[in-house]
Amino acid sequence: MKIFVLISTIDRRVLRIPDTIMMPEPDVYYVVVWQHSHDVEMEDIDITPLQIRKDVTLVTIPGKGLSHSRNIAMKTAADMLADAYEDAVFVIADDDVRFKSNAFGLINSFYLQHTEVDMALMRMRSIMDRHYFKKYPNELIDFRKRPRSYYPASWEMTFRVGAYRAGIRFDTRFGLGAEKLCAGEEDIFIADALEAHLRIAVAPIDIGYTRPLTTGHRTFDTKVLRSRGAVYGYTRSLPGAFIRSVREALSLSIRQRTRFSPLFRKIWYGVKYIRNAS
């Protein structure tokens, strides 16, 4: 089974990619989408180490937007398959991920063994202290039965090409580089996959290391709070989104000893934004 590692990067961060990709392996391919922002010159960047690799496809596009970049990567990988019915696995990666030497063998074996699974969220550890970011389940479980404290991250995501063929995409209104909402794209992607009746699992498989902090951990950032509200508005009824927004704002205000109203207004802005935009 072919594995496509989909890596999004921007501007000079492309220089990190040679440290992310592994030595060539049979049936493992890398699709690197390199975005150019409007205020950075690229002529002095040496991308020769990527260009000489036959297993690396480099796609260059203008602008910003992580979700857009990942959609381009998925399309590029899907188009590389000779047979429209051929199975393959996509692995979402950032330019600071470091994969374990046996990661792709583990991924391949998992999907060959678990033919019923369309998407599996796999384990990553901190690249700094080698600890897990969260408490992972110790056995394979259905995503719907995950612990309440478990939230998905993009660098855990592996899935069959069938998810792309089913029309599942990253919502470009969410994620780094989006105008209003800087996070939450993973939640929306998974919500759409569940809506399409794809089978999602959390798998006790370690595949690599990444940096410990993500955008969503910036608790009081306005765009982060709006993003949380937008996820609630997208995945819940309006009354359900209101109740969840109140609880979130109240919890944050108590823990951080700050005012409830400004927090709620930012979260509720996200709810209204996404429901008006739908």
Image (cartoon, rainbow, N blue to C red):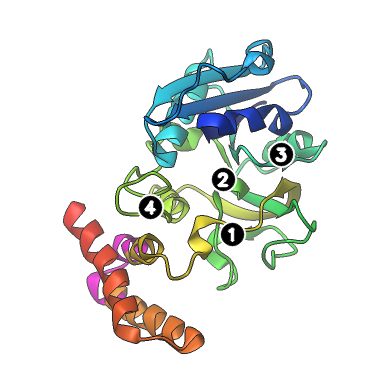
Q: Disc 1 marks which residue?
A: 142
Q: Disc 3 marks which residue?
A: 107
Q: Do the residues labelled 2 and 4 touch (CB within 8 Å)?
A: no
Q: Can residue 6 be seen in this view?
A: no
- Secondary structure mainly formed by the magenta segment: helix
* N-terminal label among 3 and 2: 3
Q: Do the residues labelled 3 and 1 touch (CB within 8 Å)?
A: no
- Could you tell me which quadrant the N terminus lies in? top right
| Res 119 label | 2
Residue 31 pos. (x, y %) = 57, 24
What is the distance, in whole Å, between disc 1 and disc 2 at their CAs?
Answer: 10 Å
The stretch in magenta equals 230-240
What is the distance, in whole Å, between disc 1 and disc 4 at their CAs?
Answer: 15 Å
Badge 1: residue crowd in 10 Å (few <14, some 14–19, many ≥20): some
Nearer to me, 116 or 240: 240
Give me the residue at 62% from left, 49% from top.
Answer: 156
**Amino acid at dot 4:** Glu
Q: Is residue 193 visible?
A: yes
**Amino acid at dot 2:** Met
